[in-house]
Image (cartoon, grey):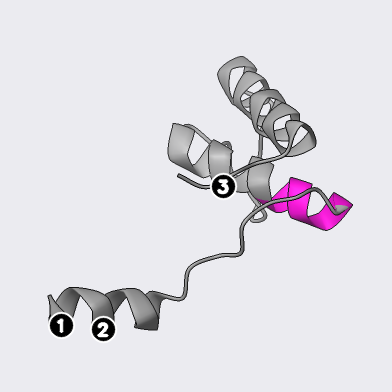
Amino acid sequence: MAKYSKDSQEMVKDAMHRMKKGKLQSSSGDKVTNPKQAVAIGLSEAREKGAKVPSKKNKKDTKKKIKND
């Protein structure tokens, strides 16, 4: 399991609350209704502020791993 800092956890928590209140928007300006998208936005905001967040997985590497298994 990946380790996330307290700051990043707070950012994700805040993003989830904003989503539930209907105030969270994606970069295109549309209202976010998917919890997974809210988590992704929270982690992205945490990365921007310099919080300890694991790096994004490369889709290419993931596909190779699945193919090799």
Name the residue: 76% across, 55% down: 47
| Residue type marked 3 | Ala
Q: In the rendered structure, does residue 46 fall within the stretch colored magenta?
A: yes
Instruction: State the mark number for residue 40.
Output: 3
Left or right of 29: which side holds 35? left
In the rendered image, residue 47 lying in the magenta stretch gets the answer yes
Q: CA distance from mark 3 to mark 2?
A: 23 Å
Secondary structure found at label 3: helix
Magenta: main secondary structure:
helix
**What residue range appears in magenta?**
44-49
Local crowd at mark 3 within 10 Å, few (<14), some, or many (≥20)?
few
User: Looking at the image, can residue 34 be seen?
Assistant: no
Residue corresponding to mark 1: 68
> Do callouts 3 and 1 mark residues in contact (Cβ within 8 Å)?
no
Q: What amino acid is found at the position of numbered circle 1 in the picture?
A: Asn
Residue situated in front as seen by the camera: 49 or 31: 49
Quarter of the image holding residue 48? bottom right
Question: In whole angstroms, how far apart are the C-alphas of marks 2 and 1?
Answer: 6 Å
* Residue 69 picture location, percent across and down: 12, 75
Residue on which disc 2 sits: 64
